[in-house]
Amino acid sequence: MSGNGWNLKQKLEEALTAVLPIIGIVAALSLTVAPLTPSVLLCFLMGAVFLIFGMMFFTLGAQLSMTPMGERVGTAMTRSKKLWVVVLLSFLLGFIITISEPDLQVLAELVPSVPNQTLIIAVAVGVGIFLVVALLRMLLNISLRTLLIFCYVVVFGLLLFTPKSFQAVAFDSGGVTTGPMTVPFIMALGVGITAIRNDNNAADDSFGLVSLCSVGPILAVLLLGLLYPPEGTEYVAESFLEVADSVTLGSLFFEGIPHYFREIGLSLLPIVLFFGIFQIVSLRLSARNLLKIGVGLLYTFVGLVLFLTGANVGFMPAGNYLGQILAGLSYRWILIPIGALIGYFIVKAEPAVYVLNRQVAEITDGAISAKAMGLSLSVGVAASIGLAMLRVLFQIPIIYFLLPGYGIALLLSFFVPKIFTAIAFDSGGVASGPMTATFLLPLAQGACLAVGGNVVIDAFGVVAMVAMTPLITIQVLGLIYRLRSRKKQPAVELDPFAGLSDTAIIEL
């Protein structure tokens, strides 16, 4: 119990480090160029408190429950030695966790020309199919780079024939459906599957599931765009609720808790049931291990309820309002550097980023440190938000950014170690989480309304931009690492990890 207490204290410090810079930036803006109403500012500050405690519980909960659950399920699936069992279970797992993803319901509302259930089922089938592809790639030792190049050639080929109203939302869907609840489980699943392999490439292949699972939703929405004619989509800005006193402020948040309580409960249930079946049929873990996982699930549940309540009730209206104010200034260009600054810090508050950074450090034996990963993600997201705000202000089509961006990312994959490519493409789905959807996307929507743009075409796509730029920055990190290893150890030019022992730690 004392260990958990210490862990909670450590996680609280991490959450404060992530959220306090965002509070400072918004507070500074509200006192200078972007005055906020007392209601919006109070909701934002209250939301920040919920975010901090939500991150604290979630990061500890994912470490205690989601990660060990995913690893054990992955190991058990591959030990069955029956390919059809792996394929069937992988598809079912991808399908059920996508159906239960809360953000997918939001995505369905953004495409009015497609019935909600049709879109949800299509996206879930897409994730299920690509989870099967990702697992087969690991088992058969197929190159991730080859698969990614093929997938994105197909994606951009379809994009040329898809109506504009579907393009940004399709790429947004890739980041939205890999949420903070499913990412830790899917990543751990990959670690569990490669754990039974003894070859030198096992560590490299531990990553890549999230990147391939992100392709499924993009293809599903683009295909729906070819089947369903586009309809006029009018975005209606949310009205701001004026808070008269502290009681009204409190009720605003506490009335939202039951909604997210039910939403997260329904989202966690399929994963728990899936793991429960494995426990009965194959795993048979001890009561002590099950108790630890149960406590972790409770932490995860409480953390996500608090996090989503704070993000949706407090951060979303503040982001929208701030975007309208900044884009309404006579020097609206200031939105670009401010957006980049917010993006630099806000990715640190994404719940799944901590899971990714910790898992990368463990799998690579410290070769890729959490600090280097965090810096690469922050730089990438800062660049993406700056470009997204530029796109909003000048109504630039999203394909002008995505096509060269993914082209550069895929080109870099030929020059960096395989593990950096896998981690980079996984990080895109991880970085574009709930903080992007509930603060940065509303920021772009508010700015788009202020400049008179088309919100569905010009503002949506922020999630897609956030998912794209880390692919480049983390592979640049890999390129730097390769060049440094060549200077220090010429003998390991072709494979920087080849001569290392399992316990070796390399400083970047």
Image (cartoon, grey):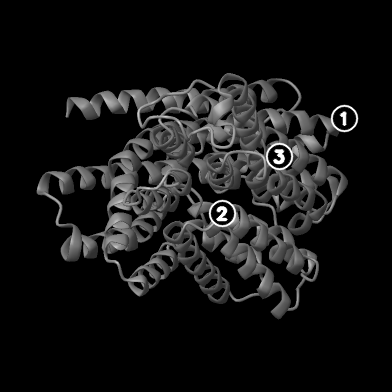
Pick whichever of labels 3 and 2 is earlier in the sequence. Answer: 2
Pick whichever of labels 3 and 1 is earlier in the sequence. Answer: 1
Query: Is 118 drawn above or below residue 410 in the view shown?
Result: below
Q: Tell me the residue at 44%/68% (across/down).
A: 95
Q: Tell me the residue at 67%/50% (across/down).
A: 464
Disc assigned to residue 476: none
Q: Secondary structure at mark 1?
A: loop
Q: Which residue is mark 3?
A: 384
* Three-letter amino acid code of the residue under disc 1: Tyr
- Residue 361 vs residue 357, the one in the foreground: 361
- Residue 417 vs residue 89, the one in the foreground: 417
Q: Secondary structure at mark 3?
A: helix
Q: How many other residues sit within 10 Å of disc 3, few (<14), some (14-19) or many (≥20)? A: many
Q: Which residue is mark 2?
A: 144
Toward which corner of the image does residue 170 lie, by quadrant?
bottom right
Disc assigned to residue 331: 1
Where residue 253 sits in the image (x, y, percent)? 44, 43
Where residue 154 sits in the image (x, y, percent)? 70, 66
